[in-house]
Image (cartoon, coloured by chain):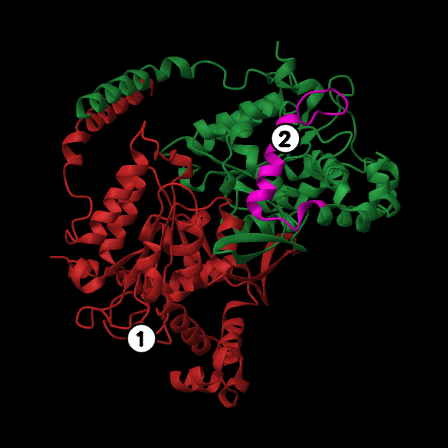
Chain colours: A red, B green
Amino acid sequence: MKLAKQFFLVALCIASLSLPAFAAADPLPSWNDTAPKKAIVTFVERVTKSGSPEFVPPAERIATFDQDGCLWAEQPMYAQLAFALDRVKALAPQHPEWKEKQPFKAALEGDVKTVFAGGEHALLELVMATHAGNTTEEFGQTVKEWIATARHPKTGRLYTEMVYQPMLELLAYLRANGFKTFIVSGGGIEFMRPWTEKVYGIPPEQVIGSSIRTKFEVRDGKPVLVRLPEINFIDDKAGKPVGIQQHIGRRPIAAFGNSDGDFEMLEWTTAGPGPRLGVYVHHDDAGREWAYDRKSPIGRLDRGLDEAAKRGWVVISMKSDWKVIFPFGKR
Amino acid sequence: MKLAKQFFLVALCIASLSLPAFAAADPLPSWNDTAPKKAIVTFVERVTKSGSPEFVPPAERIATFDQDGCLWAEQPMYAQLAFALDRVKALAPQHPEWKEKQPFKAALEGDVKTVFAGGEHALLELVMATHAGNTTEEFGQTVKEWIATARHPKTGRLYTEMVYQPMLELLAYLRANGFKTFIVSGGGIEFMRPWTEKVYGIPPEQVIGSSIRTKFEVRDGKPVLVRLPEINFIDDKAGKPVGIQQHIGRRPIAAFGNSDGDFEMLEWTTAGPGPRLGVYVHHDDAGREWAYDRKSPIGRLDRGLDEAAKRGWVVISMKSDWKVIFPFGKR
């Protein structure tokens, strides 16, 4: 065993010694050499240069990422809403009353427009009916099965393929430079955790999101956490800095978002001392993805577009700054 | 630069190659070779042996630790209560009414007995008056200043010296074996975070505790998180598994506590599949520390003592299993 360990270490060392050669390769190959890429690389070089007054110790290199519209596509509707609608269909046999009751009737008929017309209240009812009442383990299993098979309505791809290739490279680049990467999403925390490690390299403990309450119970001698139909926390807008403090306990030095729901996260992040990076992904590529901003009900970016320049935040044009959008579109 | 990097890597390799030699040294030198140490080492060997059916991937090697009475002393009163009493004194000039108002009057007079006589309500009032109303950054700074100077009433040592040397070794041993170590305490999350990294090697994002609500605000153009006088979460008893799921999102494989407040955490942890480790620190050393269990108002251990054996949990006798208690008592 010890000999094997030594061989392994020697192999590791050989690999390490050849790192400087590899380091010359572009870590962000899907990014055009435009201003956003330069701003990101310059920022990373500033905070990682040891001896520099701007050096940030690895423990403090916290980077937070919104998910919907920042790491993966959010059009034509949030993946989690598609999940909720599919769950309504799966659970319908146990709820014959849903056939005549809104918003379930509309959900069963695939009439998303009517579901939306019910406003926040209708969506909350859908979420509670489909996300609560089970245990954390049961819910995690349901999400795992859904995400492994559900297909995006427009592309027919798995949702986990609808991720942005340039952002995958960015996550890896930051981690290679000692950053700890977190998701800070308005989406459900337990809807993301079952698959973020595999898809983004982000483990469950680095996922922050909205949540419902849970309750510890012992059922037939077996402890379980039961998911209750009550909101615990909404991780959106002014809730994002609150969620960040609750989970991480320190202010990020870099934050990435794509909508006004991320404004306060970028504001909180970039108000700290020393070098800071605030970045918006702007959806302006109707050909390869979608084009939407100020008027979109999903992922509205209005105030953010107005204030980004004066606040020194970087705005990524998906159309001009990214060579490819999705991994399946890699050249 | 590149040359320097290569030299560094060579040095690193030499260090790595000599690791097997060091590995022979006992990683738990302050532990007697009694059953608890053997149980811990056996568990770690089982879950880290690659190829074994009991192997646990590093990402799933989550170990959770209670703080008060498990990592540091909690007698004659919780350090956080001492902090609250000191804060009452510091804030008294701004609150002349406290001179005549309980529980503040008793706190100002150092009459802890009367404070306690007021029950949970009195303690909650003290906590809210001393922990809320400021920003997260102001509160963190206050804690930092207090913890750097406040002395334990019995030993005159800094509170951060009142930590258990065997547990410091255990934390380091687990991390050296790929574990991620978390604190899961009934104490205030923001009371611990400013110093746990330095004292235990546990960064703020791996600290879970009780909390009050916070609110994001922009004051004179500067974003702040204001601490509100409202309970957000109580991380004790059945709250511990809830807090663990909320923050970590997966079940630990090892959990360490010392009171009935940790029972549900050990129960939740050890109910999972595969090898599991549940450990109680039993305070039975009146000479070197304190002896208390079933009848103690602080750190009561009653049900846990009754059920540990039948649940396969390890009980550490501080008297018999630890060679030293505190770092300053190291031989």
Q: Quadrant of residue A300?
A: bottom left
Residue A42 visible? yes
Residue B149, magenta (yes or no): yes
Q: Quadrant of residue A312?
A: bottom left
The kind of residue tagged 2 is Ile
**Circle 1 sits in a helix, a strand or a loop, which is it?**
loop
Residue A230, magenta (yes or no): no
Q: Position of residue A140 (x, y in %)?
A: 46, 59
The kind of residue tagged 1 is Pro
- Left or right: B326, with A85 as reference point: right
**Circle 2 sits in a helix, a strand or a loop, which is it?**
helix
Q: Nearer the viewer, residue B60 or B216?
A: B216
Q: Nearer the viewer, residue B123 or A313?
A: A313
Q: Are marks 1 and 2 on the same chain?
A: no
Residue in the image at 28% along x and 73% along y: A292
Residue B276 visible? no
Residue in the image at 52% along x and 29% along y: B198
Residue tagged 1: A76
Q: Residue furthest top?
A: B331
Q: Which residues are magenta?
A: B130-158
